[in-house]
Amino acid sequence: MKHHFRQLLRARRDSLTHADVLEKSKRITDALVQSELFEKSGSLFAYLDVRNEVSTRSLIEYCFTIGKPVYVPVTRGQDMFFAQIRDFSDLVEAGYGISEPAHPVKAETDEKSLFIVPGVGFDKYGNRIGYGAGFYDKYLNCRSYMHLIGVCFDFQIVDRLPKEVTDVQMDSVLTEVRWLIAEKEER
């Protein structure tokens, strides 16, 4: 069932033009940086976008200009950790066309970290479908002290997604037209 949603939502996202992606991503970034969550955060943990995902470049650049530390994912085998970047020149291309810090030093989140999570799709309960490798679910499973914000384009939100016991729910989902507070459900 997840495979069906993954294919459908990726196809919709892949049909966006580059201009559409940038315009919608700008709205998401604007809403995020104007939020109290962003204002109160001490650091940003975010992904580096690929394949028509919500672009994080302007968000990350804004953090550079205001001095908010930025951390991005690094994968090694089946594990993921986060490392700081200070500039986009710190990056090199890694697996799957995803950029990573050239010389990553493992960093850890804290209660003041703002955590932005990518996804192929989300539902109103904060459930998420990623690419299927489970990196984010494994990483976030023991870090319940952070507010997790899933970001996507509005058409990537569906009524209900299938979920597994290992799936980590988002606290909220932000799109170019709305900010949903997840309706948490019991497992």
Image (cartoon, rainbow, N blue to C red):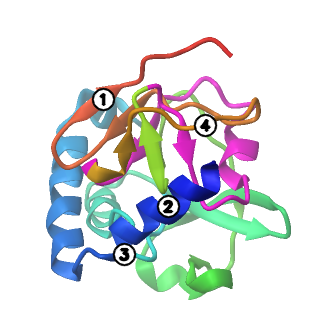
State which mark lies toward you, 3 or 1: 3
Question: For residue 109, what is the image quadrant?
Answer: top right
The Cα–Cα distance between marks 4 and 2, rounded to whole angstroms, is 24 Å
Which numbered disc, 4 or 1, marks the residue that appears first in the sequence?
Answer: 4
Q: Residue furthest right?
A: 77
Which numbered disc, 3 or 1, marks the residue that appears first in the sequence?
Answer: 3
Q: Residue 114 location, x and y as percent?
A: 45, 39
Q: Which residue is mark 4?
A: 162
**Left or right side of 145 for 5:** left
**Left or right side of 30 for 40:** right
Q: Residue 134 location, x and y as percent?
A: 72, 52
Q: In this orientation, does residue 102 appear?
A: no
Q: Amino acid at mark 3?
A: Asp
Q: Which residue is mark 1?
A: 180
Q: Are marks 1 and 2 in contact (CB under 8 Å)?
A: no
Q: Say above or below: 134 vs 143.
A: below
State which mark lies toward you, 4 or 1: 4
**Left or right side of 64 for 22:** left
Camera-nearest residue between 136 and 81: 136
For disc 4, the neighbor class at 10 Å (few under 14, some 14 to 19, many from 20) is: few
Magenta stretch in the rendered image: 125-154
Question: For residue 52, what is the image quadrant?
Answer: bottom left
